[in-house]
Image (spheres, grey):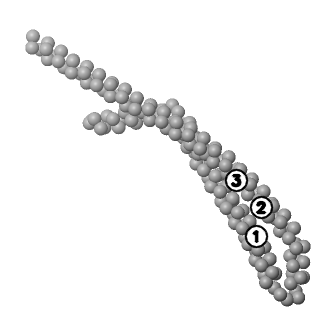
Amino acid sequence: MGIADEAETAMKRFEWRLQKVLDVKTKEEQFKRMELFRLSEMLAIKRSELLMRRRILQEIAAEIARDRSRGRLEAQEFFLRNADVDDQIIRTLHGEIEKLETQRTQKTAEVLAVKRFKEGLEKLRTEAKVRFIEEQERIEQKEMDDGTTIAFARNGSIGL
């Protein structure tokens, strides 16, 4: 067995007691990222809907303003009668957008907190792995030194 094989065998024996916690935090981060993505998509949809409604209202108002026929007053009256319904829809969309932005901000903070915690665990794992490898190397060196000492002692006793 070569040195590389021994190191690989030693690494297979490396068990970190917090590995399950790290695995859970990794999955939690993935889940929270998916939730953040979903919130961002919903926010984009609501913003798009708001822009579309505003654009339609502006186009209708501009069309009424360009109209010089007798029907203009009727169209303007109809537009103004229904404007409060559109205003309420726009206010509702604004409220939904604000709520989604707040949720997204909170979810972003949650993702960052989990990520920092996970990165701290990964750093601890790396440090534990380095200590484990160093300890394995010390043990191997001691075994080789003991083997050399025994071999030297045997060779020395044979020559007497």
The residue wearing badge 3 is: 101
Determine if residue 45 is in view: yes
- Distance in Å between CA atoms under marks 1 and 2: 10 Å
- Quadrant housing residue 127: top left
Marked residue nearer the N-terminal end (3 or 2): 2
Task: Using the image as rendered, state which of residue 95 and residue 33 is in the foreground.
Answer: 95
* SS under mark 2: helix
Q: Is residue 15 left or right of residue 62?
A: left
Q: Amino acid at mark 1?
A: Arg
Which picture quadrant has residue 74? bottom right
Structural distance between the alpha carbons of marks 1 and 3 = 20 Å
- Camera-side residue: 83 or 11? 83
Q: Nearer the viewer, residue 95 or 125?
A: 95
The residue that disc 1 covers is 53
CB-based contact (under 8 Å), mark 1 and mark 2: yes
> Circle 3 — which element?
helix
Residue drawn at (51%, 31%) of the image: 17
Coordinates of residue 92 in the picture (x, y in percent): 80, 60
Residue 50 in the figure: left or right of residue 108: right
Circle 1 crowding by C-alpha within 10 Å: few under 14, some 14–19, many from 20: some
- Residue density around tag 2, few if under 14, some if 14–19, many if 20 or more, within 10 Å: some
